[in-house]
Image (cartoon, rainbow, N blue to C red):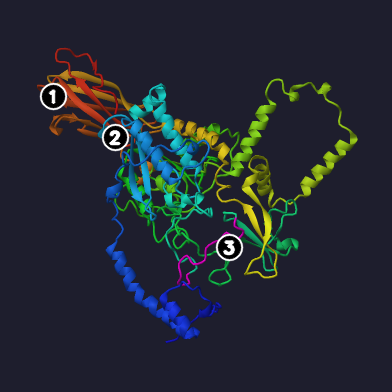
Amino acid sequence: MRLIVSHRKFPPLADWPAGSTPLFAFARKQGGRLVGWFLLVAASLFLMPVAVATNQLNPQPRRGAVVKPPAKSAALPADEYLAPPDNCCEATSYYSNRYLSEHLALVAREHPDLVRVVSIAQSLGKREVWLVEMGQGAEADRKTRPAMLLVAGIEGADLIGCSAAVAWVKRLVEQYKTCSDIAELLDTKTIYVIPRLNADTAEGFFAQPKLETSLNNKPVDNDQDGLIDEDGPEDLNGDGLITWMRVEDREGDYVLDPADDRLLVKADHLKGEVGKWRYLTEGIDNDRDEQWNEDGPGGVNFNRNFPYNYEFFAPDAGLHQVSEAETRALAEFVVGHTNIGIVVTYGAADNLLKTPGSAPSAPAPSGEGRSRGRKPTPAIDQNDLPYYRVMGEKYRESLGLKKEMEGASYPGTFSDWIYFHRGRLSLAACPWSPAVAIELAKANQKKEKAEPGDSTDAPDQDKEPKSATEEGDKEVSQKSKTDQDKRNEQQRKELKWFDEYAPEAFIRWQPIEHPDFPGQRVEVGGYCPFSQSNPPPGMIGDIAARHVDFLTKVAQQLPRISIRKVEAKRLGEDVYEITIQVENTGFLPTSLAHGQTTREVYPTRIIIEMDNKCFLSGSRITNLPTIQGSSGMAESRYVVHAPNRDRINFKVVSMLAGQAEGIIELAKNRSSSLVARPSQEPK
């Protein structure tokens, strides 16, 4: 048997980190490399059965099981949490997990008839993942009403999404008694909000040093060297931030941006450029493998951990789909609440800034072998695309954007799983980015210039003519703009925005002495953690308010069935022709086209409380076709034999559009038709 070893140059055991394991410490005392590597292989073979046994003792919950929260955290305690201090308002700063828990507890105590807060999971760091349920009425009614789910903080770097979610909760409960639209929303629909799914990673914003990542705290051997999280970043200049470092090195791939030397740009070898700089996360090479910070804390991005288009073996995708407690709990919650018709996800993916692409509708499955030859849907069904277009317009209008911008898509996202597997309308938004901030600044400038009395409204004759020098400067400027390197154009625009609105977000490069690069120029600086994914504190309130407006508009688009007309016509002795018309007073249809393709959304049905033998035409349960929104209607007719009956009860049940009940009044002594009224308002 031959042992094939790669050509990678391993460091001698004497140079390995002192805190590896007792096995490595013993090998270090023995001296040679061969003994050490032999012991490493032996330890791996010994520990493998232990790991398997541990996994068997702590299995993942089976598919379809209800994930129950820990007994101690089934609901927020009544007296443990106090209101957050005034300086922790969402308008001026971001929520830590502690203040988030306190604030949600306070809202739930002040509005017990509208708000319920429970924990659906517990993180590796023993932090609760809170679910907020809003709606009036009994629990049974809330579970059958049209519902919307908002998920924020699915990636740990998203703090503004959490602030927007909490602000929306507050807005709804505060305006319930003063705004008729909000009252109708909470009386007839159910709202679910998960303000922060990745609770552990968000704490990096409040930690010292401050570190930004989208991964949870699960230990992972990213570089597959037998050690876990042994080479993470360090705060080399002691400013309390993990930023970036650039190293002047001929082996680097970057050059300084000629237009702004604070930025780096990839060397273009086709232009004869030679790389002069390395661009690395701030830190040292702890495991001496000539890679820097490649195996730091954390391992799984929740928004890459869902089944649709899951990327196997990706470094941040997890061991398998929904492998983490938080993602598993979220998936089980969605499966267990079939009334959810709209899902909004705040994360890196975005299908609202720009209308996504579409694909032709898949043929309806029928007959034996109906799954044979069917291919996965690669894009949004073309019949569903108009709804995404309308929602995108509402989103950009709420934010104040005048045009479409580039969206983003990633493998294994929660939002894609919701649409492509669950068949629901799934809206994904990156709640803030420097690119969005630039467009908002442009819109504000245009608005200010368009205001009456502005100097721009003055007649042309009042303006002084431009001199020849100014005209020449303009020509030179236009020419230089044409010759300017376009590679870093967007990055330069973003840095200019930060210079004007948040200059503290970019740390100027400062030289340091680096132990891994003796005699070389090393500088630490760049963007602060979380600065490129969240707005400056002074803008939190404004951005959150824009999202609150959008979320309210979206919730009002849910489908809602009602009974338009019931007609009973006497045909003979105890024989009646019954006509029932069901309408959808909401905006969305009772099922998207892709919901029918996946068969995850059941048809709307009419259930008449009579024995099957009483039906001369029709049946007790009738499936209706998809009912379009904006008062779309479906009609069903029956001929029944109803002796000794003067009324018949029935109900209409829709998975996503709620339920409605009605009574059919039977006329005994006349042949004219009667119109029966619903027995109660739609649930």
User: What is the quadrant of residue 499 in the picture?
Assistant: top right
The quadrant of the rendering that contains the C terminus is top left
Of the numbered discs 3 and 2, the one sitting upstream in the chain is 2
Of the numbered discs 1 and 2, the one sitting upstream in the chain is 2
Residue 653 percent coordinates (x, y) = 27, 33
Q: CA distance from mark 1 to mark 3?
A: 82 Å
Kind of residue sitting beneath label 2: Thr
Q: CA distance from mark 1 to mark 2?
A: 30 Å
Confirm whether residue 599 shows in the render: no
Which residue range is magenta in the image?
224-238
Crowding near pointer 1: few (<14 within 10 Å), some, many (20+)? some
Residue 151 percent coordinates (x, y) = 42, 43
Kind of residue sitting beneath label 3: Gly
Compared across the picture, whether 605 is left or right of 176 comes to left
Q: Secondary structure at mark 2?
A: helix
Q: CA distance from mark 3 to mark 2?
A: 53 Å
Q: Residue 283 shows which numbered tag?
A: 3
Of the numbered discs 1 and 3, the one sitting upstream in the chain is 3
| Prevailing SS of the magenta stretch | loop
The residue identified by callout 1 is 642
User: What is the quadrant of residue 667 in the picture?
Assistant: top left
The quadrant of the rendering that contains the N terminus is bottom left
In this view, which residue lies farthest toward the left?
644
Residue 323 vertical placement versus 68 (above, below): below
The residue identified by callout 2 is 144
